[in-house]
Image (tube, rainbow, N blue to C red):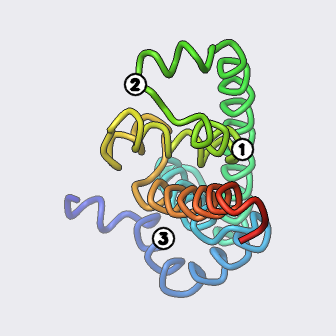
Amino acid sequence: MTATTVDHPRARELAAFIDRDYRQVVGSVALITGDRAVAEDAVQEALVKAWRKRDQPIERLAAWITVVASNEARSGWRRRGSEERALARVAQTIDPEAACETTGAIDPELQAALAALPLRERQAAVLFYVSDMSVLDVAGALGLSEGSVKTLLSRARTHLAATLQQDETGGVA
């Protein structure tokens, strides 16, 4: 940042917002989205947008950032929903037998357990364990953070362990 940028009125306004209102706005957006991490990302995006509009007046900056962050989160939901619908359509066109031929033999019980996972967990698990991609590569492929991928993999392992253990014993573990 140059001295002129730091002296810009919007820079001072944003610094004051961060000191005074940031936590409350993130908390409000988290209540709206139901996810604090999504809220933090959305508020960060709103701050960037506020900076880009630095030569235009914004009345009630905290309220403006709250609305912009909420809209940003909603756009993310729509984007993810579209992605999931597209991936589900693609998944319907893939022949699991042919997929097994290209990735090596996968135990039918494991294949059934993978198919029972929620879509994102299944994607992460298959890319990481079957396709032997790194967490970083899976994150890039799915458009997620590394932390989100690690969470999905942890959940997938928990679900797979419960499903496979149930199948072995013939009952609930």
How far separated are the C-alphas under marks 3 and 2? 54 Å
Q: Quadrant of the C terminus?
A: bottom right
Residue marked by disc 2: 104
Tell me the number on the disc at residue 116: 1
Q: Quadrant of the N terminus?
A: bottom left
Q: Are circles 3 and 2 on residues that touch, CB within 8 Å?
A: no
Task: Answer with left or right where residue 124 lies relative to residue 95.
Answer: left
Name the element at disc 3.
helix
Vertical side of 147 occupied by 141: above or below: above
Task: Answer with left or right where residue 88 lies relative to residue 37.
Answer: right
Residue marked by disc 3: 14
Q: The disc labelled 2 sits on which kind of residue? A: Gly
Q: The disc labelled 1 sits on which kind of residue? A: Ala
In the rendered image, residue 123, in percent from the top left (x then y), is placed at 55, 39
Name the element at disc 2.
loop
Residue sitting nearer the eye, 85 or 134: 134
Residue at the image position 67 percent from the left and 57 percent from the top: 163
Q: Residues within 10 Å of mark 3 (few under 14, many from 20)?
A: many
How far separated are the C-alphas under marks 2 and 1? 20 Å
Q: Earlier in the sequence, mark 3 or mark 1?
A: 3
Vertical side of 139 occupied by 159: above or below: below
